[in-house]
Each structure stands twice: as C-alpha cells, then as structure tokens.
Image (tube, grey):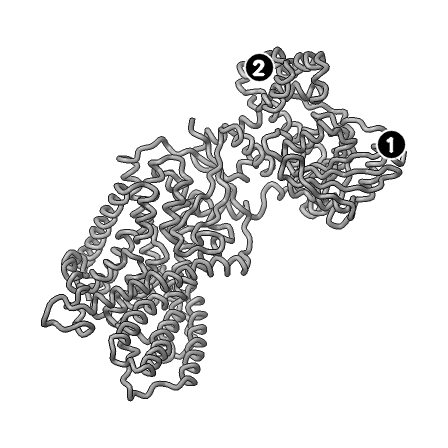
C-alpha cells in the first residue's frame, strides 16, 4: 500500500490562494515545469498522506471549464484524461457565488470532489456566515473544509478529509444539476446514444458528453467527429435546433443559466450575508455622486475646486518660481556670460532675451501644472473620474451624443493628442470623427499658463473663476458643436447603453500621486527643453532680423520692424474686432500653433525680453549668500501664502452667494503679502483692457490645436478632416472672441 | 420565464441610460462577481463587447508606462449592434 501513489488535482479561480495551499501541502517537494506543448506553468508536488505517497497537481486558475482559454483547456483535459483520485476545488469564501460556478462543472464531470473554503477569515470579517454542513448537503455530500491558507489554518482538517475520502473510496457528488424539463428530455436521449458507443467512454461520462454536444463545444464535437460518430452529431444538432426554436434560447445559454441557478440556490440555503453586503459604502456615496439631479452640480463643483487650486492656491509658488528664474538664475547666467567677455554681444541677447525669457517664461508655470495634475490625479485615483464619466455620459446621451465620447474628452483636459487616439474606443467612425473634432475644445494643460498669467494680471484672487469659466466654455462649445454635427453631418443610430463598473472609492496613495504628477509635469519640462527652446531661438532670430534697410541691423532692431514684427503686423488687424489687434498678440498666437505653451514664451520675449535681469557691468549684483537667503525666505513666504490661499477657498466659495461676505484669512502682513507684479503681467496690463484679455483667452481656448494634435488628427482621420478642424476652430475662436469683446463693450464691462 | 443570462442581456437592450454594474447586480439579486462572469459569457458569444482603453501619443512626453495623460478608466461593456 505504501508504494501506491495518489493524485490530487488542485483547482479553482485565479487568486483564491490555491498556490499557498499547494505550498503548504507539499513544502519543498515541488517540481515546476510547463504543461506539455504550452507555456502555462505546471506545478507538481508530493507529500505523505497516511500511508500514501500523494502527488498534488496545481491546475491553472480558471473561472470555468468551457475550454475557451488555454488554462481552461489544460484544467479540463487533465481532469478527463488523467483521472485524479480527488479534485480539491479551492474557493474564495468571501466571493463564494462566483467561485461555485466552476464547482458545478466538476459536479457535471462526476469527479470525486472536496470543497475548500479558503480565505474564510476574510469572509467572516465581512460578516458572511457559511454553513459548511448545509453547503455540503447542497453539493451532494461533497466534503467541505474551511481554511486560511496564509496562516495554515485548516490544513490538518483538509488532510484528514482527504484521507477519509480516499479510505472510504472516492465517489462523485450525489447531485445532478437540473437543466429544465425540455433540455433534460433531450439530454437523456443523447446520453443513451452516447453510452451505446463504447469508444466514447474515454472522452468523459455520457451525461457530460451529451451536455457538451448540446453546448456545441468545439473540442468535444471535433473529438466525436474524429471517432466517426457523425450520426451522434446530427442528432445533437437537431436537438439544438428544437430546443432553440421552442425556448427562444440556445442550449448553451440554458445550460449555463442552469448552473448559475444551481449556485444561487446553493448559496441562498447555506450562506447568510449582512444587510450591508449588497449595498456598500461606495454604493451609498454613488447614489448621491451619480444622482440624476445632483451628479452634474457635484461634477461642476469638483471642477471649480480644481481650478481654485490651480489658479489661486498655486499663485504664490508661481510668483516664487518667476522671481527665481528671472532673478538669481538669470543674473547667474548673465554673470557667467560676463566672465567669458560676452556682455553686450548678440550671444548675451540670445541667451537672456531668447532662451531665458522664452523657456524661463514657460517654466515659471511648473507650479500651476503641479497643482492641476495633482488635483486630477487625486480625482482619478480616488475613483471619482469614473463617476464623472458616468454623469457626463447621461448628459451627453440626453442631447443625442455618444456618452462614451466623454472618456476621450476627459483625457483632453490633459493633452489633446491621446484624446484623439482614445476615440478608437468608439465603435462607429462618425462618433470617432466627431469626438476627435470636439476634443480640441477641452482645454489642455498647455493652455493653462496663458489663463494663469492673464488671470493673475487682471483678476487677482478671482483668477480661478476665470480659468473655471474658460474650461466650462470649452465644454459648452464642444457639446454645442456635437449637437449640431450629430443632427446634420454625423447622424448615427442612437448610442448603445453600456454597463460601467465603478471602482470602490479609495484613498489615493502618495506613491501613485507622485508617479502621475511627475510623469505629466516632467513631460511639460521636457517640452520646454526641446520644442519651446527651439521656438524661443527661432523667435529671437526672427525678432533680430530687420525687414528692410534703414530700420536697424541684426540684433539692433525695434521688434515691430523685425521679420517677426512685420509678419505679425500683417495679420494683427484681423483681431482688432476682438480687442487685441496689436502685432504682439498676433505674433504670439501664430507661435501657439507649435505648442500652446509657446504663446507665453513668445509674449515673454516680445514684451519683456531679459530686461529684468540685464545689468550693467559695474552694477552691484547680490552675493551668492544673499541670493540663497532670498530664495529660501521667499519660498517660506510662498508656502505660508499657499496655505492661506488654500484656506481662503472656503470664504471665496461662500462669497459667491451675494448675501454673504465672509472675511478671508491673511497669514502675512499686507505689505509682505502684496504681490510684486511681474514685468510680463505689467506689460499685459498696459496692452490689454480686462475685456480684451478675456477675449484673447477665449481665442486661445478655442483656436487651432497644436501641431502634435493636428498631426494626430491627420493620422487618424486624414488630411481633409484635419483641414476642416483647423478652419472650424479658427472661425469659432474668432467669432467667440469678437462676440465677447463687442458685447462686453456694449455693456461697458471691463473696458478700462 | 427567460433564463438569468437572457435577463442580463435584456437589461442592456431595455436600458435608456448607462447602468452601473453593482446596481444591475442588485436588481438581478446576484453578486457583482457573478454578474461579471455572466457578462464574460455574452462577450464570448459576441453579444456584448468590452470598451477597452486605447491610447497613443505623440511620443514627446512618454512616461514610464506610456502616455501619462491616458487615464485608467473602469471597465465598460456595451451591446454589440447587429
């Protein structure tokens, strides 16, 4: 007897702790290889059970034995062909209903079976009470053992059960699934026919084979055909037709449903769940957050909060970065150039007026983007973004748009390029084209620096409201364009409803937040070091070249007489009805096609250059110690002011309601807090009225996407579609900016 | 009476707006995991399709896990239009 080897197959769904049990049973006596002809790992191990040398085979984790995946085929073939002495079905006790589906298929195979309720501690903690005796009865006397694999609890009980089952002589569970009267009648007939063909015995038990033929299982049908039993296949085929015709459902669906019904009956008799099980805390929060009425205001409130954080709370750090780049950094670079005898040369002009002003002018917005990307990452990781997609889907569907479009549109808040590619998730070409077309109106992160500088210059503490309004305007224009296009050129069948799995709410982990924010912000910095650097040099060059004789020479020409200024002056009158018909604005908008961040870089070069940094040779520059002390002190002040701005979100929100006037917090004396308006802000205030500034921002929001996004559009939908988009965005941006300026002027708002 | 699997499919056919998996499971009095496996069945049969993420980028700001702006969205399943 001692020489006899028993074989136990360990089966179960993925992630039920099967491997932990396998290790606990076999210890170090394991062999790991591959299943023959497959790349799926095969684990075998041995242990002594009573007097038997016992082999344990760890089958691949599967949800079913339908033989659709490699893992399912391996598990099924092994059980049928190798005839293990016992199948130990490991299930996750806290997720019993789903796990028992696989168990029903072992019952159909009429295999000797033991059920292991693993992770029973987790089920217990969730208030799930399983009656093992009741469960065993429902499963036709299948022994049931509770274990906690990770702690080794229940392992001895499992071994004792295995030994008892082996000693008593293995037998299959004494229960059969009921597939309904009609199907059972056909099943009996087919079973009898199969039993009469001796050669088929190797393929499985007759009832199981009959089931598989009625399910039209490709592998079993092929095996039966190979044995020349075509009459059997014909009979099965006729039965399938009869059942389908009379019930309206094909046998496979009926059989699968019968398994689920069996599981439901089993669970209802043996499992008690707490009332709260069916409705988790996430579900309760969702009933408010995704509510038909409240869902949209909550989404808007979230966005409002994001832009308060982005535009107002980040402002002190923006100022600090600005003073760092245009102060100590620029002075340091200038000192270095002096050291090399380059003071007053065109090289100094290129570095200070071109690169520092252009690239530095963009890099000062890193804090703004850090705040934006942190806010988005928090919403994403907490699970809120999925709810936002759900809420917006309902809104979009109600106006005839495909709700799933909102996913690419959400991505568009970060960058338009992946938003265009993300339209591939949509089924229909028309929906894809339309979504990509309107995605450009979802304001990407690169436009934010423009809103931030204008917001800070013209609206102070209300800058967040300007940014929020622009984002909302972008969404409204996108929806309006969608509605019109959907009723005219992009008519489709109504979108199909879908089911969305909302992940449970969770606290975002610092690690995930840091990864998200770093990857997104570093992309912006990398762009500054490549695209924006190149653009800055090109713009400096264009601004250094005189267009005709007598207006100056290279690097000694008034900006308006340079090549850049002359070209900009040609198109500037187009923007006059929108209130910003100066060549500086026109030139900046031209460069914005390369990348939206370049607009600010160009403005910085045009309006400011390196004027703040450039000092004469005999001027007393601060010492290194003074510079470092200044940087540290101003950083500390910026941190205090950021905390102040964060707290002030509350009074500012309340004060939106006209009857309230809650005082705002002030952590630093007014003299220290007072903002030192930067040279670019000052220049903008001299060149724009508040109304013209809003019109300019509206134009930036709506006009052509950047070059990368335009290329993506062409790549996905062709040149014609790209051209339509370019033309449409230019027209809509111009019309919107003109309307803002002209209506505002008529009403006398922000004209001075 | 239609089988439980056909009832799942009927929910898709009769819905006027998107459905939340957990809410649908509650209505059908089954747990979410079981509903998920029923949906898998219909996906395999070609009646439903999983709307998967599909992102690409301009390769100018690749993060370690691809385009940093592609958001990880939850599972979405829709009826296949025949």
Image location of residue A458, percent across then percent down: 28, 67
Quadrant where the N terminus of chain A sits is top right
The location of residue A465, given as percent across then percent down, is 34, 60
In the displayed structure, would residue A6 be above or below residue A664?
above
Which chain does the residue under circle 2 lie in?
Answer: A
Q: Residues within 10 Å of mark 2 (few under 14, many from 20)?
A: some
> Is any atom of residue B78 visible in this view?
yes
The residue wearing badge 1 is: A167
Coordinates of residue A110 in the picture (x, y in percent): 73, 25
Vertical placement of residue A740 versus A175, above or below: below
Q: Point out the residue furthest to the left here.
A: A550
Query: Counting residues from the N terminus, which is met first, the one under dot 1 or under dot 2?
Result: 1
Q: Quadrant of residue A185?
A: top right
- Name the residue rendered at 56%, 21% in the picture: B1
The reply to whether residue A394 is visible in this rendering is no
Q: Residues within 10 Å of mark 1 (few under 14, many from 20)?
A: few
Q: Nearer the viewer, residue B61 or A674?
A: B61
Judged left or right of residue A167, residue A678 is left
Q: Which residue is mark 2?
A: A237
| Mark 1 and mark 2 on one chain | yes
Is A187 situated left or right of A491 in this image?
Answer: right
What's the mark number on residue A224?
A: none
Residue A397 rendering spot, x and y as whole percentages? 38, 38
Tag 1 secondary structure? helix
Marked residue chain, label 1:
A
Q: Secondary structure at mark 2?
A: helix
For the C terminus of chain A, give its image quadrant: bottom left
């Amino acid at each position: 007897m001692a020489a006899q080897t028993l074989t136990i197959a360990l089966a179960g769904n993925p992630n039920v702790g099967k491997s932990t049990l396998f290790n606990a049973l076999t210890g170090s006596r394991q062999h790991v290889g591959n299943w023959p002809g497959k790349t799926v790992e095969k684990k075998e191990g041995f242990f002594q059970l009573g007097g038997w040398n016992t082999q344990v085979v760890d089958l691949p984790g599967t949800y079913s034995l339908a033989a659709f995946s490699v893992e399912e085929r391996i598990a099924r073939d092994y059980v049928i062909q190798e005839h293990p002495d016992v199948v130990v079905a490991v299930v996750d006790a806290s997720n019993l209903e789903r796990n028992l589906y696989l168990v029903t298929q072992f019952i159909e195979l009429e295999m000797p079976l033991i059920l292991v309720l693993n992770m029973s501690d987790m089920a217990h903690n969730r208030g799930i009470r399983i009656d093992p005796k009741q469960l065993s009865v429902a499963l036709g006397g299948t022994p049931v053992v509770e274990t906690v694999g990770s702690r080794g609890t229940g392992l001895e009980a499992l071994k004792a059960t295995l030994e008892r089952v082996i000693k008593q002589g293995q037998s299959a569970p004494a229960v059969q699934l009921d597939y309904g009267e009609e199907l059972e009648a056909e099943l009996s007939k087919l079973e009898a026919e199969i039993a009469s063909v001796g050669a088929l015995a190797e393929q499985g038990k007759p009832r199981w084979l009959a089931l598989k033929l009625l399910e039209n299982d490709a592998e079993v049908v092929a095996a039966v055909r190979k044995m020349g039993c075509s009459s059997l296949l014909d009979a099965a085929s006729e039965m399938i037709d009869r059942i389908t015709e009379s019930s309206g459902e094909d046998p496979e669906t009926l059989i699968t449903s019968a398994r689920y019904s069996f599981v439901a009956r089993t669970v209802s008799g043996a499992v008690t769940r707490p009332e709260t099980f069916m409705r988790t805390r996430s579900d309760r929060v969702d009933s408010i957050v995704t509510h038909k009425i409240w869902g949209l205001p909550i989404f808007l409130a979230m966005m409002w909060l994001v832009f308060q954080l982005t535009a107002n709370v980040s402002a002190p750090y923006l100022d600090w970065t600005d003073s760092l780049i245009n102060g100590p950094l620029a002075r340091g670079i200038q000192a270095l150039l002096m050291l090399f005898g380059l003071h007053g040369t065109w090289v100094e002009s290129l570095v200070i007026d071109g690169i520092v002003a252009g690239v530095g002018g963009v890099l000062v917005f890193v804090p703004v983007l850090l705040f934006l990307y942190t806010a988005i990452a928090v919403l994403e990781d907490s699970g809120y973004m999925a709810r936002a997609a759900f809420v917006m889907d309902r809104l979009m569907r109600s106006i005839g748009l495909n709700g799933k479009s909102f996913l690419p549109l959400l991505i568009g808040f970060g960058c338009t390029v992946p938003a265009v590619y993300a339209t591939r998730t949509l089924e229909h070409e028309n929906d894809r084209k339309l979504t990509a077309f309107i995605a450009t109106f979802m304001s990407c992160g690169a436009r934010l620096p423009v809103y931030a500088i204008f917001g800070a210059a013209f609206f102070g503490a209300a800058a967040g409201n300007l940014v929020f309004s622009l984002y909302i305007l972008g969404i409204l224009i996108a929806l309006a364009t969608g509605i019109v296009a959907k009723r005219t050129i992009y008519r489709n069948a109504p979108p199909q409803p879908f089911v969305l799995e909302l992940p449970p709410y969770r606290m975002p982990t610092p690690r995930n937040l840091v990864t998200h924010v770093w990857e997104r912000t570093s992309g912006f910095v990398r762009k500054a070091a490549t695209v924006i650097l190149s653009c800055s040099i090109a713009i400096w060059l264009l601004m250094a070249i005189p267009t005709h004789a007598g207006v100056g020479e290279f690097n000694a020409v008034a900006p308006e007489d340079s090549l850049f200024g002359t070209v900009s002056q040609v198109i500037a009158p187009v923007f006059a009805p929108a209130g910003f018909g100066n060549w500086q604005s026109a030139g900046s908008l031209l460069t914005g096609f390369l990348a939206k961040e370049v607009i600010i870089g160009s403005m910085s070069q045009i309006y400011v250059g390196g004027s703040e940094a450039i000092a004469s040779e005999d001027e007393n520059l601060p010492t290194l110690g003074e510079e470092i002390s200044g940087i540290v002190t101003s950083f500390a002040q910026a941190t205090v002011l950021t905390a102040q701005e964060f707290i002030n979100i509350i009074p500012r929100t309340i004060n939106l309601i006209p009857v309230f006037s809650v005082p705002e917090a002030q952590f630093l004396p007014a003299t220290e807090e007072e903002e030192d308006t930067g040279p670019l802000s000052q220049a903008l205030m001299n060149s724009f009225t508040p109304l013209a500034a809003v019109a300019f921002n509206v134009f930036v929001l709506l006009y052509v996407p950047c070059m990368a996004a335009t290329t993506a559009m062409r790549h996905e939908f062709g040149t014609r579609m790209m051209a339509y988009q370019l033309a449409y965005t230019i027209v809509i941006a111009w019309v919107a900016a003109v309307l803002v300026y002209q209506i505002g002027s008529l009403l006398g708002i922000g004209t001075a | 009476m239609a089988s439980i699997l056909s009832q799942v499919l009927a929910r898709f056919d009769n819905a006027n707006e998107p459905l939340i998996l957990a809410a649908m499971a509650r209505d059908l009095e089954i747990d979410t995991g079981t509903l998920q496996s029923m949906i898998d069945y219909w996906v395999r049969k070609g009646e439903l399709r999983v709307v998967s993420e599909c992102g690409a980028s301009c390769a100018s700001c690749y993060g370690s896990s691809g385009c940093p702006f592609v958001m990880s969205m939850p599972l979405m399943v829709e009826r296949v239009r025949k």
